[in-house]
Image: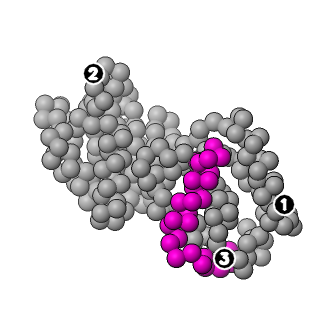
Amino acid sequence: MGFSEYKYTGLPLTPAICKGLIVELFNGRIESRKTIVNEVLKTHLERGGKETKAVDKSRMLKKALEILKSEGIAKNPSRGYWKIIDKNYLVDSEKDVSNNDVKEVQDNEVKEVIKVAKEVVTEKENAGVVLGNGSSAVYLYYLPGYHENRKKDTWPCKIGKTDGDAYERIISQVSTALPEKPRVAVIIKTDNSHALEQAVHNILNYRNKKIESALGKEWFDTNPDEFLRIVQFIEESTLLF
């Protein structure tokens, strides 16, 4: 899309404009609200839009996300993270239409898509949530048997890091060491995997979650939700990634 084709060239960013950009940029993905805010603001300006008049930009984006949530387009699976699930909530940017026409088309598309929409997440085979950006990653995986036979809300999970592709790293670790194929539940992409992994480990150690009897290192009595909450806490506290 060229700058001249952007329908909102010369206009300040508003919640209504944010809605369309959020779906276009993050459709089928789960991302932190911070990432969504930064990318939407950046994209609007790069395409020729004007700076928003709102003092609190984050609050304006949150309002747009809440509207999308009420329409069934966005979900909030974990505190601070949002999942956009509508692959067809787009308006042809080449059409010369008014803002009212755009809203009408969007509303009609939403009503139709909600009937048949299925949840979509960014994933590879046997993988769950993939968040963040960066050349390295911190990941959580577990054996399905541990999860299926659990007697509480937590179970043995491996939390490790890699400077390359997380899937290749995990495959190299478990190809012969484990009795079954692991479930890769979360991958956090970052440029500072060492610091993020250490911070997560330290918090879980403080909570007495480390499994000392595990055959391998870095196994903790936790679950993906707790892991994500810890990552979010670290992100908000230290901006590691």
Q: Mark 1 is on which residue type?
A: Asp
In the displayed structure image, the side of residue 23 where residue 9 appears, left or right: right
**Range of residues picked out in magenta:** 46-74
Q: Secondary structure at mark 3?
A: loop
Indicate the quadrant containing the N terminus: top left, top right, bottom left or bottom right: bottom right
What numbered label is drawn on residue 151? 2
The tag earlier along the polypeptide, 2 or 3, is 3
Give the spatial CA distance, label 2 vs label 3.
Answer: 53 Å
Instruction: Give the percent coordinates (x, y) of residue 32.
Output: 46, 56
Residue 127 image point, x, y percent: 46, 38
Tell whether label 2 touches label 1 (CB within 8 Å).
Answer: no
Q: The residue under label 3 is which amino acid type?
A: Pro
* Residue matched to label 3: 12
The residue where tag 1 is placed is 101
Outermost left residue:
212
- Seen at 35% across and 54% down, the residue is 232
Front of the two marks 2 and 3? 3
- Mark 3 or mark 1: which comes first in sequence? 3
Report x, y in % for residue 84: 58, 48
